[in-house]
Amino acid sequence: MEILHKELTDQILKTFYDVYNELGYGFLEKVYQNGMYIELKSRGFEVEAHKQIKVFYKNYEVGNYYADLIVNDLVDSGIKSC
């Protein structure tokens, strides 16, 4: 299986582990998300938080999805509690 945007995804994962190792275990999702936002920005990435994305099913708009973080307008960096 080919991973889309593998180089960018690898950099995001490395950033996540750096943030997690700095903060440690047990915080709510929002704490890690804020850390990721700060760290990704400091590493030169374009980052948007809580970006609204329209969802379509068979050409019908069926709702909205709010991404935790969008990196370089390509990757949804979903954060879950650790």
Image: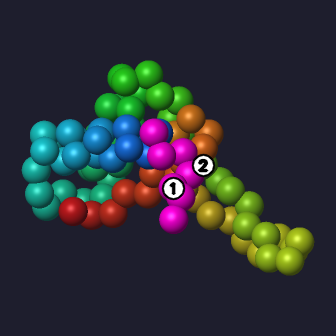
User: Would residue 53 be found to the left or right of residue 19 on screen?
Assistant: right
Numbered circles on residues, count: 2
**Residue at horizontal 27%, vertical 64%?**
81
**Residue at horizontal 60%, vertical 44%?**
74
Local secondary structure at mark 2: strand
For marks 2 and 1, give the CA distance. Answer: 23 Å
> Residue reaching furthest front?
1
Q: x, y percentage for residue 69? A: 48, 47
Q: Which amino acid does label 2 sit on?
A: Lys
Q: x, y percentage for residue 65? A: 62, 64
Q: What stretch is highlighted in magenta?
A: 1-7
Q: Main secondary structure of the magenta part?
A: loop
Q: x, y percentage for residue 51? A: 60, 49
Q: Circle 1: is it few (<14), some (14-19), or many (20+) Cα within 10 Å?
A: few
Residue 5 magenta-drawn?
yes
Q: Which amino acid does label 1 sit on?
A: Ile
**Residue at horizontal 37%, vertical 24%?**
43
Label 1 sits on residue: 3
Classify 56 as above or below 15.
below
> Residue reaching furthest right?
59
Residue 23, by quadrant, is top left
Q: Circle 2: is it few (<14), some (14-19), or many (20+) Cα within 10 Å?
A: some
Is residue 39 visible in the rendered image? The answer is: yes
User: Would residue 18 be found to the left or right of residue 69 on screen?
Assistant: left
Label 2 sits on residue: 51
Q: Which colour scheme is used?
A: rainbow
- Whichever of callouts 2 and 1 sits on the residue coming sooner in the sequence is 1
**Residue at horizontal 30%, vertical 58%?**
29
Image mark for residue 81 = none
Q: Nearer the viewer, residue 78 or 29?
A: 78
Q: Quadrant of the C terminus?
A: bottom left
